[in-house]
Image: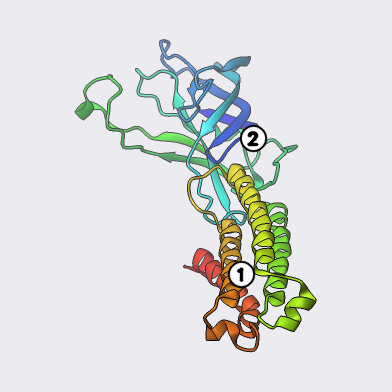
Amino acid sequence: PTGILIQSLEFLSGDNVQVTGYLWQRLGPGVPDDLVPGVVLPEGTKDSYKLSEAYRFEENGVETVGWYFETILREPFTYAEYPFDEQDLWVRLWSRDFTQDTVLVPDFASYVSLNPKSLPGLEKEFVYSGWTPIYAGFTLAIQPYSTSFGIRTADQSAGRPEMYFNLILDRNFAGPFFEHMIFAIAVLILLFGLLALTTDDEDLKARFQLSTAGVLGAASGLLFAVILKHNQLRSVIGSPGVSYIEVIPILLYGVIVVVVLNAILLAAPYEVTIVHHRHNLVPVLAYWPVVLGLLFGVTLVVFFR
């Protein structure tokens, strides 16, 4: 029987999570004398074997050994729905003694409740840093390894159940969502202003004092700001895939290009009907329906496909 208590966790990057807490094992009379007690954290990128013994306690012939651990777990997480994503953080536990046919099982007697919603194995005064825990609990699974780790031959090595502690986390979306959405709304309004002031009417051009070069200069400044914001977002996520929130900077890139092309076509010597009709009225009227329609379409694809 093996138990765990998670005291803190922090996402260091898209795939790395720093976790601290306590592990313990109950060593009853049936445990072989030559068994080496202890737990290994195979997903850990550091200190997977380094457990600091915290206490020993013996009662009714059962010895309980507890360790404090601090490690960085590297696990694959999916950020396609960021910042509306849920993540499954798991702690896989191996027995330290590979030579014995040891199976770790949850120490059910050490928990007040095993209801996943009561979050067994989690510190009550927990700092989640932008996350809300939904469920916590144990699972056992058999992993199909392609090697026997040098113990017996591969065909003689049968898979043993491995113990997992799973923690389902729901991200608090308000902070990252509104941070990027407010920025996007401001940029979209500025781009709409550039589009609305761009015209081929000489009287209006003299009144607005906005030339094609002025549109290019303003769009370049906005493009630079969007690139910085996009890089900041990528550094926070740290995932090679494209997340939902990245639709915003990608959409802004496209809108900036369209606004610049619209200004160039208006200044071109040949006439493009859709642009010159009533002095650029069609692009101005189509701006918000197209932008919001694209955002709505991507939302449907990501969340309801």
Above or below 213: residue 22: above
Mark 1 or mark 2, whichever is nearer to me? 1
- Disc 1 residue type? Val
- The quadrant holding residue 245 is bottom right
Q: Which residue is mark 2?
A: 9
Give the crowd class for mark 2: few <14, some 14-19, many >=20 residues within 10 Å: some
Q: Is residue 262 left or right of residue 214?
A: left
For image coordinates 42% across by 14% down, the residue present is 35
- Disc 2 residue type? Leu
User: Residue 126: where, in percent of width, then height?
Assistant: 72, 38
How far apart, in angstroms, are the residues tagged by discs 1 and 2?
A: 45 Å
Q: Which residue is mark 1?
A: 259
Q: Is residue 38 visible?
A: yes
Which element carries disc 1, helix, strand or loop?
helix
The one nearer the camera, 74 or 259, is 259
Of callouts 1 and 2, the N-terminal one: 2
User: Residue 255: where, in percent of width, then height?
Assistant: 59, 67
For image coordinates 31% across by 37% down, the residue present is 144
- Cβ–Cβ under 8 Å for marks 1 and 2: no
